[in-house]
Image: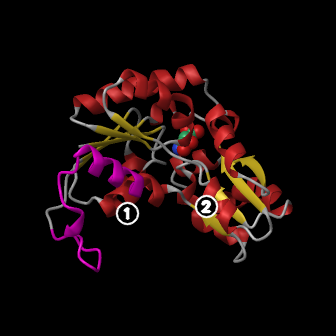
Amino acid sequence: MIGIFDSGIGGLSVYREIRKLLPWEDYVYYADNAHCPYGEKTKEYITGRAREITEILISKGADIIVVACNTATAAAISTLRAEYPIRFIGMEPAIKPAVAMTKTGVVGVLATAGTLKAEKYRHTRDTMHGDVVVVEHIGQGFVELVESGETSGPHAEEVVRNSLKPLLDEGADTIVLGCTHYPFLIDVIRKIAGPGVTVIDPAPAVARHLLEVMQEEGLLHGNPDCNDASGAVTENPGHSEFLSSGPDNILKKLVSKL
Ligand code: DGL
């Protein structure tokens, strides 16, 4: 069983990509929305939450865990890997593909304060950017919009514009979404950024990496060849359970739309 967690419902943007690739697997998803957002919290606090959630997911039967949260990956994944005997898959900010894609030589990264200041993110950025300039901005208020189910409309557009504009003003033509909540705002982000800007959601790449690791570790319970050419599942779909530490109305609503 695949365990997935996030500070809230953002990780569902990763779950949806994983499930497309591995539809026969069983899932348990944990939204830590009673403690959301993680973005401004300390490394110690986030590591404590990540441990508690890991215990819950393992007790539910998870034999591999996806940390579907950039902030928790940056803060806690090395501790989790040291303390638990199972594999953890984390979020990687998509700097490398963005650097390969940009024509203006400027890549923008939107992420939480916690991710942008983390050693893990800075190391990835510094080793990948080459001659390309990387400009960063916190997606201020983005997580709150997604957690409240407000992913379109004039207010959402204003909030997104405030954080996106500084990156566009610097000439960024490629924007990396460095927080798993942000893909739920991708239509608004694209609308404000305009057609000349590419927006990268790293979730499909994380899903492919998970498949490779599960193949290597012999953890797959179904067969990747059971998706026919149209992508339809020809094997029984697996079961998904959704847990949360706070109210689950928005979680349920979003799950029903995935
Ligand atoms: N979804 C998260 C991330 O990928 C965390 C957002 C938050 O709780 O601040 O960073």
Question: Where in the image, quadrant-wise, is ligand 1 located?
Answer: top right
Along the viewing direction, whichever of 40 and 24 lies nearer the viewer: 24
Point out the frontmost of discs 2 and 1. Answer: 2
Is residue 107 visible to us here?
yes
Identify the residue position indicated by label 1 in the image: 257
The label on residue 56 is none
Residue 88 picture location, percent across and down? 39, 37
Identify the residue position indicated by label 2 in the image: 97
Quadrant assignment, res 195: bottom right
Q: Residue at x 49, y 28 (%)?
A: 78
Give the magenta part as a residue range. 207-234
Residue 181 picture location, percent across and down? 54, 50
Above-or-below relation of 105 to 211: below
Q: Earlier in the sequence, mark 2 or mark 1?
A: 2
Q: Split into 4 quadrants, where in the image is the N terminus?
A: top left
Is residue 140 visible to us here?
no
Query: Pointers 2 and 1 in contact (CB under 8 A)?
Result: no
Figure disc tally: 2
Q: Split into 4 quadrants, where in the image is the C terminus?
A: bottom left
Dot 2 amino acid type: Pro
Quadrant assignment, res 234: bottom left
Q: Residue at x 19, y 61 (%)?
A: 223
Q: Secondary structure at mark 1?
A: helix
Above-or-below relation of 182 to 48: below
Q: Residue at x 33, y 63 (%)?
A: 20
Q: Residue at x 65, y 61 (%)?
A: 98
Alpha carbons under labels 2 and 1: distance apart: 29 Å
Above-or-below relation of 101 to 87: below
Residue 117 on the magenta span: no
Does residue 145 appear to the left or right of 12 in the view shown? right
Residue 190 picture location, percent across and down? 65, 69
Does residue 242 appear to the left or right of 12 in the view shown? left
